[in-house]
Image (cartoon, rainbow, N blue to C red):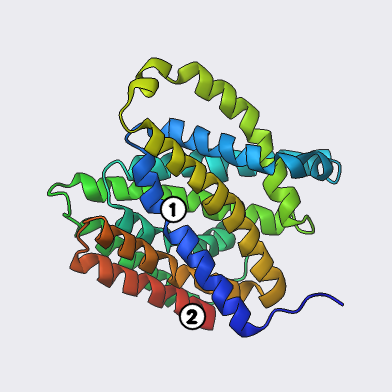
Amino acid sequence: MPLKIKRDDASFLLIVLGCIWGSSFILIKRILPCFNPVQFALLRIILTGLCFTPWFLSSFKKINRKQFSWLLLLGLMGYFFAYALMGLSQTHISSSLAGILASLNPLATFIIGIAFFRQSFRWKNFWGIALGLLGSLVLILFDRGHGDISVGFYSLFMIGSVIFSSITINITQNHLAGLSPYVIASVSFVGMALPALVLFASTADWTSLAAHPQILTCLMAAATLALVGTVIGSLLYYYIISKAGALYTSTVTYIIPLVAILWGLIDGELVHWNSLLGLGLIIGGIKLIRST
C-alpha cells in the first residue's frame, strides 16, 4: 500500500520547502562576491550534478535519445541560463526583491503554456495575467532601493530567469511526462555538469580565487545552495506533488517571497512600498488564474 501523506504533514513539508527556496537568494548574495554570474551558474550545476551522480547511471538507462535531447535542453535553459541571469540580477538588486520576482514563475509558466504549448485559455484568465504583469511593472518601474534606475533594469534579468525556468516546466509536462523526478533531475544536471566543469576550470582565475578573503564563505554558500536548495528542494517538491497534488504544492509560491523578504530584513535590506504592493498584485493574479 503506497504511503499516504496527510494534509497537516503536507503543510509542514510545504513550509519547509518554502523556507529552503526562499533562502536561496540570500545564499546567492553570499556567493557573488567571489564568482561572477556565469561562474556562479557553472559552479551550481557542477556541485548539483555531483550530488545527483549516484542516480545518473541507473537513470540514463531509462531514457531514449529524444528524451535525452529534451533533458539537455532543459539543463541548458532551466539551469545554465536561468542561474546565470539570476546571478546577474542580484549583482544590483536585493535578495528580497529577487525572491518577490521569483513569484512570477507560475504566471510565466501559464503564459508560455498558452503561447507555445497549446494550453487552453479562457478570457477569465486575462485579468489574472494583467494583474500579475501590473505587479511586475510596479516592482520594476518604482524600485529605487539603490538610488538609480539600474535596479529596475537588473530586475529584468531576474524576470528572464523566471521565463527560462517556466519554459523548462512546460517542456517537462509536454515532452518528459512519465519520467520520474530522479531521472529528470539526475540526467539533466549530470549531463550539463561535465561541460560546465570544463568551462569553469578554463575561465576561473584560480590565483585570485585562492587569495579572495571571502572564498571559504562563498564556497560554503555554494555547497549549501546546491545540496539543500537544489537537490533536497527539488526532491522534496516532487515528493509533495506525488502525495498531495500539483495544485496544492504550487502554493509554495506564496511562501518563497515572504522568506526572502525576512532574510533581506535580517541582512539589513530595505523593503520598499512598491515591493509589497507588487507582491500583492502578483499573488492576486496567480490566485485569480487558479480559481478560473
Q: Give residue 7's mark.
A: none
Residue at x-position 42% and y-position 48%: 160
Q: For residue 186, which quarter of the picture?
A: top right
Q: Give residue 24's mark.
A: 1
- Between 262 and 254, which is closer to the camera in this rendering? 262
- What amino acid type is highlighted by mark number 2? Lys
Query: How crowded is the residue under tag 2: few (<14 C-alpha within 10 Å), some, or many (20+)?
Result: few
- What amino acid type is highlighted by mark number 1? Ser
Residue at x-position 87% and y-position 77%: 1
Measuring from the top left, give residue 207's x and y in whole percent.
38, 15
Q: Mark 2 points at which residue?
A: 124
Looking at the image, is mark 2 or mark 1 earlier in the sequence? Answer: 1
Secondary structure at badge 1 equals helix
Measuring from the top left, give residue 29's x and y in whole percent.
34, 45
Q: Does residue 51 sit above or below 287 in this rendering?
A: above
- Between 30 and 153, which is closer to the camera in this rendering? 30
Q: For residue 23, which quarter of the picture?
A: bottom left
Measuring from the top left, give residue 135's x and y in whole percent.
32, 67
Residue at x-position 54% and y-position 55%: 166
Measuring from the top left, give residue 143's x and y in whole percent.
20, 57
Q: In the rendered image, is residue 116 in sight?
A: no
Secondary structure at badge 2 equals helix
Furthest residue to the left? Answer: 147
